[in-house]
Image: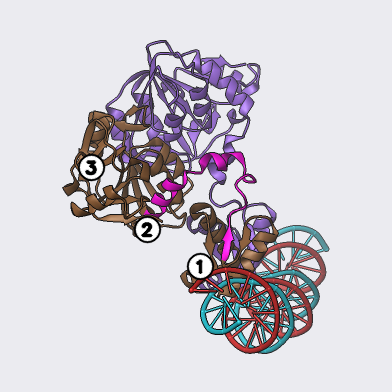
Chain colours: A brown, B purple, C cyan, D red
Amino acid sequence: MLAAERREYLLDLLTRTGKVVAKDVAAELGISEDSVRRDLRDLAAEGLCQRVYGGALPVSPAVVDYDARQAVAPDGKRKVASAAVGLVQPGGSLILDGGTTALAVARALPKGLVCTVITHSPTIAAALLDHPQAELFLLGGRVFKHSAVTCGAAAVEAAQNVSADLCLLGVTGVHPEAGLTTGDAEEAAMKRALSARAADTYILASSEKIGTASQFRVLPWEKVSGLITDADPDDTVVEELKALGVTVVVAG
Amino acid sequence: MLAAERREYLLDLLTRTGKVVAKDVAAELGISEDSVRRDLRDLAAEGLCQRVYGGALPVSPAVVDYDARQAVAPDGKRKVASAAVGLVQPGGSLILDGGTTALAVARALPKGLVCTVITHSPTIAAALLDHPQAELFLLGGRVFKHSAVTCGAAAVEAAQNVSADLCLLGVTGVHPEAGLTTGDAEEAAMKRALSARAADTYILASSEKIGTASQFRVLPWEKVSGLITDADPDDTVVEELKALGVTVVVAG
DNA sequence: AAGATACATGCAGAAACGTGCAGCACCAGG
DNA sequence: CCTGGTGCTGCACGTTTCTGCATGTATCTT
């Protein structure tokens, strides 16, 4: 690995996860902590990061340019997103839903990760254009503007021709009894179609979704492999879900 | 191996893998590291790569393609775009190509215009999300990152299921003899497929494209209804085109 | 307050670098 | 056919840069 490449990696990690821990990076890249510290020191000297004890943080959010700020997802979604990214295997394939949480996942996906991403969201596709290693497949169909995804017969049909290891779905409601729900019937059907094409389906749900329900059922709990959330693991509703046998991936 | 050939190889490696390690390339090609370093130094001097200790990296990590072109000749493209919008009938249907000129068309489309837009570009689709009156249909397929559109068998097949009154195509070269050309064979095929599904096909070509030719032919002049350009109507090349019977729509 | 952890600094070996030089192929003109 | 010029390549040399380790210091945690 080139020195300059390493610095790129650090900056990327910084924007994706919001922090860098020197020790972890050293272990991950198989280099000494001294090198990581030296890099961080240099980056800090150029004003590209803020050095702190144990690693580094992004320069204060007020300094980054407008577009970048536009892009920062709420903290909860970012946590969920980075936990979700951990489920993606190098070389694997991923069906990625639309919506803001899924968009956070797309942004959190390491640029160097070799994988195939299948999506029905033009927004997600646009966000992944600068991921050179990600093969990208777009499911066509009538665009449902409210949530910026393709829906309807053509989209469902297109979905029948793909399959993947993993499907990450966003929903608007996560409830022990009502199951996983969303606000539109077409959208719910599309999510079901996507889920059916993957070996495993995980639900992306930032904490504010937990315990709420919307009008249309997407999937019953039996059909999902797990729930990824930043909610407190000791939360009453989360405990209920666990009691139902739902695998809960805690995003911290 | 020729020197120029070697440089091609380096640039290719750079876009494919995102980096070049001098030592590795030297070993792989059986030449000295000095030669590799010399090549990299030259390429860096031309702004084609960024020299770093141990090898080289792309100028600005992989994003150069689309974003950079975004800024080229915005004025000409805007003129072409607004002339193109004039061809769209209320209640009509439009097949819109990808690329920056087409993006300008999408942006220039009146928000209140009732119409159906069919596109194979996630970027265009994203830009039209805030047009409440525009019905939007996205053609799915493998996403070709360089130009941010879907291409290949699936995309062509999807195109077979739609039809429209008008097709607006962007190209990279407009030449009296070479015809309409673009830099990628897949893309050219996709453009042909789109054009075949519309009653009329117009070409979007800002002035800097006029008189140039790229590697792959999209369409011969007989298949297009007209050319929309901001180039001077008295320009030699434009006169030649008119002499060939091409309808030229002057934007400006 | 004490142990653990992270840090800066100096140092030495390794790797990469630039430069000058010589060998070689190729070409043009005599 | 020869000769001088030109451009590319690999090698040798001295220099610069990087990296990991050791040391002593600063900072955090309990």
Q: Earlier in the sequence, mark 2 or mark 1?
A: 1
In the image, residue A98 above or below residue B116:
below
**Visible in this render: residue B10?**
no
* Residue A41 in picture, x, y percent from top left: 66, 65
Camera-nearest residue between B93 and B250:
B93
Determine the CA span between mark 2 and mark 1.
16 Å
Quadrant of the image for the N terminus of chain B?
bottom right
Please report the bounds of the magenta region as a residue range. A55-83
Left/right placement of residue B66 relative to residue A218 reads right
Same chain check for tags 3 and 1: yes
Q: How many marks?
A: 3
Query: Which label sits on residue B91?
Result: none
Mark 3 secondary-structure assignment: loop
What type is the residue that disc 2 sits on?
Gly
Query: Looking at the image, is mark 3 or mark 2 nearer the viewer?
Result: 2
Same chain check for tags 2 and 1: yes
Camera-nearest residue between A229 and A234:
A234
Residue at mark 2: A86
Query: Which label sits on residue A25?
Result: 1
Q: Chain of mark 2?
A: A
Determine the CA span between mark 3 and mark 1.
39 Å
Q: Chain of mark 1?
A: A
At x 68%, y 55%, the residue is A47
In the image, residue A92 above or below residue B194:
below
- Residue B158 among those drawn in magenta: no
* Residue A142 in picture, x, y percent from top left: 31, 27
Residue at mark 3: A161
At x 65%, y 60%, the residue is A43
Q: Residues within 10 Å of mark 1 (few under 14, many from 20)?
A: some
